[in-house]
Each structure stands twice: as C-alpha cells, then as structure tokens.
Amino acid sequence: MEGNQSVFILLTNTGTLFTRLIQGYTRAPYNHASISFTRDLSEMYSFGRKHPSNPLNGGFVKEDLHTGTFSKYPNTTCVIYELKVTEREVEKMKRVLHIFIRSRQKYLYNILGVIGIALKEPVEFSNSYFCSQFVAEILDRSGIKLWNKLPALVTPDDFRKSERLELIYQGKLNQYRPGSEIE
C-alpha cells in the first residue's frame, strides 16, 4: 500500500574505526541507519553517538548534518531511500518517535544487540537500541512490515535490500542536496 507521503532512510559509512570493524564482519557498504521525515534530512533520528568526539557515549539522537557526528566526518558516504507511506502511517511513526524524544535521556545504545546480530540471536533490553533496530522499530510499531524478522535482527543492509524502498541518492553525504536525487 503506497501513500502520498514519504519518509527517508539514510544509510551511512563514516569510515570510523567502529564502522570499519562492523564492515569487516558484515561486508556491507553502510553500517548506520537513520530515519528522516524531511527530504532535506533536517529532521533525522537514530541511535548513535551523543557527542561526535565520544564513540562510547551512545543513545537516542536527533542527528544534524552540519553540527553533529556527520560534520566531523566529511568523507561520509551514503545512500538515501524514499519510502512511500500514508498520512496515517506518518502520524503513527511520529507518535512513536515522540515517546523516544520525551524520554531521550533514558535510552542507551544496544552494543550487545549488535553482537546478537552476528550470532543471529536478538539481544533486547528495555530502553536500549542500535541504529537499524531503532528505525525498524519505528516502522514496525507503525504497522509497516518490511521484513519477517524482529527489529533487533534488522541490519542497515536489510534496508538496502528492501524492495519497498526507492534509492534517491548515492554518494558523499555532504554533497547531498534535495533535488540532486537519482533520476
């Protein structure tokens, strides 16, 4: 069921040590997932570094291309996908998102969940997510089922392989401009 609204899934590779370690295992080109409700990515959310210079302090974040972690890594590569949804689905996603926003301080980064993916066993803790788990959770709780698996087993590469997502941009993140999408 397609709608007249869209959300955007951003997959990135910053090239940091942590992302290179993950990439060494997954062999996937991108290892971080974010969700945006705007084509210009001005309203974008994920689970990642709370402070760009500290990879150990992670949790729920509103990401900013100009002042956040992405600004610290100008060679970040990305793909951006558009997911057509209904207005009702967007409303549901934003309601779920506001739960995270209201309680953002209590959320932690689920590093054990990342290890669980490697073991193909979901590792879930209350108030603890990794990036792709969070994006999948937002979609799942809103009734959007892209896969037949738990959000705790969804990887960034699963988004890349989803037939419901339409690739609209691929390249350097700092060169993305709405309108520069793939034709």
Image: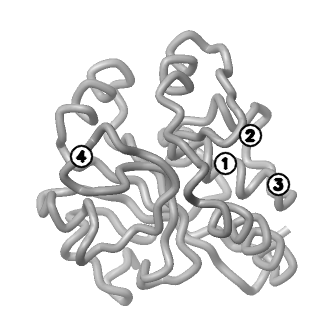
> Which is more N-terminal, label 1 or label 4?
4
Q: Are marks 1 and 2 in contact (CB under 8 Å)?
A: yes
| Residue type at tag 4 | Asn
Relative image position of residue 66 (x, y in whole percent): 24, 77
Give the foreground label among 4 and 1.
4
The residue carrying pointer 3 sits among few (fewer than 14), some (14 to 19) or many (20 or more) residues within 10 Å by Cα, namely: some
Residue on which disc 2 sits: 147
Q: Is residue 29 left or right of residue 152?
A: left
**Any mark on residue 136, and which?**
1
Viewer-closest of 64 and 78: 64
Q: Residue at x 37, y 74 (%)?
A: 182
Q: Is residue 14 left or right of residue 8?
A: left
> Which is more N-terminal, label 2 or label 1?
1
Q: Which quadrant of the view contains residue 125?
A: top right
Q: Which quadrant of the view contains residue 168?
A: bottom left
Viewer-closest of 31 and 110: 110
Q: How is the image coloured?
A: one colour
Q: Residue at x 40, y 67 (%)?
A: 63
Quadrant where the C terminus is found in the figure: bottom left
Give the foreground label among 2 and 3.
3
- Find numbered disc 2 in the image and state the secondary structure of the residue it sits on: loop
| Residue type at tag 1 | Ala
* Distance of label 1 from label 2 (alpha carbons): 9 Å
Q: Which quadrant of the view contains residue 87?
A: bottom right
